[in-house]
Image: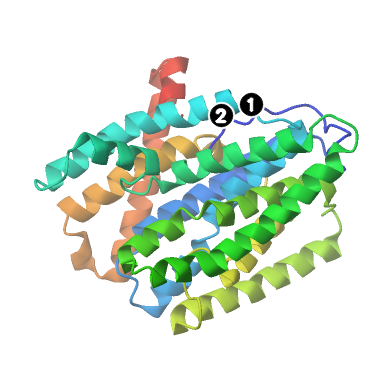
Amino acid sequence: MMTVVERISEHPRSLSVAQASARSRDGVIDAMRGIAILMVIGIHSLPQPLDAVWAKSLDAALRPCVPVFLFVSGYLTALSGRVPLAKRLKAALIPYAIAFAAAYAYMALHNPAMDHRIGTAFARFALGYVFVYYYVFVYVCCTLGLWFVFAVGGAGQPDSRKRIASLLILSIGCGLLAGSYLDPAISRLGASDALLDEVRTRDIPFWFSFVALGALTAMFADLSDQGMRRALLGAMLAAYMLYASVRILGLGDAATYDSMAFFLYAALFCVALFAIEPNSPLLGWFGSGSYFIYLWHIFIVMALRDHTPLRQLGDVASFAVCCGLTALLSTAALLAVRQLASPRLCRWLGA
């Protein structure tokens, strides 16, 4: 979703052993973002609750969308060897603040009993507790975490590559531990299912593991071998079957996020997608505006659900119509903003 990472013409020798230059990867990175934002639209277009097997299966298939964005952030950071913290936070928070105000107004119009106390409103903003904006909170926290890793690791200094790699590997382990034990611990404290779901979507150590994976991929992985790519695709499909089965059958930790099954599938999806090197100009265009689409597409989804007889079409048809219209109207909105708005306004809107 974010397109705020500075790109450079070649890999810093101190951090990356990848073969291609960062510039040659730009099209691939944007195409990955484009695929991921279309997956986001697909998830939000699914009928709720997810009762049907086909809906759960499709939802499970689309869930690696957020890990793709985090993976890309970690990858590009490892290439540049630094985290332009102020620039990233500014590019993330200004568009979010504008979208938050619009989302807050929409929620207030549809819920007369909404709590408007200043403390509650601030908590909503800080935690991304409107619509589906939790990703902004996740991204900001992961960006701070990445900055901390590179600062502690001494980026640019001798042997910094080993220190940074060690910290990234350690963070993946901590993320998996948090995903496994944080939720049971909170449950023992008497947390409701709704609160538990909100905590799981903001499990920062778990989400940061995908950022770390992206950075490690840039530093060490050579995915040019065709046999490796085929093996990754096979492993990813097997991991998806496992994750979908866990979700459908309710086996063990069947959570949507922060489970071992989800990490395995999402991690393999990210690496396999990167290895395939998608390079479609159309997907790249979507990806370059993915943050704008993320922030504003949900208004289309909510309007279709709240103000049209969409649900009367049946689950499959309503999903297809909602997904198609949302993608089409989001595309039109992005095109209009880029054609009509000033460069500064485009930045403020995330376009």
| Amino acid at dot 2 | Arg
Classify 10 Å Cα crowding around label 1: few (below 14), some (14-19), many (20 and above). Answer: some
Q: Which mark is residue 88?
A: 2
Query: Which residue is most to the front?
Result: 189
Query: Can residue 174 be seen in the rendering of this structure?
Result: yes
> What's the CA distance linking mark 2 and mark 1?
6 Å
Q: Which residue is rendered at x = 16% and y = 41% of the image?
A: 108
Q: Which mark is residue 328?
A: none
Q: Nearer the viewer, residue 325 or 26?
A: 26
Q: Amino acid at mark 1?
A: Pro
Q: Residue 192's x, y, as percent?
A: 31, 67
The residue at 44%/56% (across/down) is 201
**Residue at the far left in the pictured view:** 112
* Relative side of 123 to 231, left or right: left
Q: Which residue is mark 1?
A: 84
Q: Is residue 323 above or below residue 348?
A: below
Query: What kind of colouring is applied to the model shown?
Result: rainbow
Between 85 and 6, the one nearer to me in the picture: 85
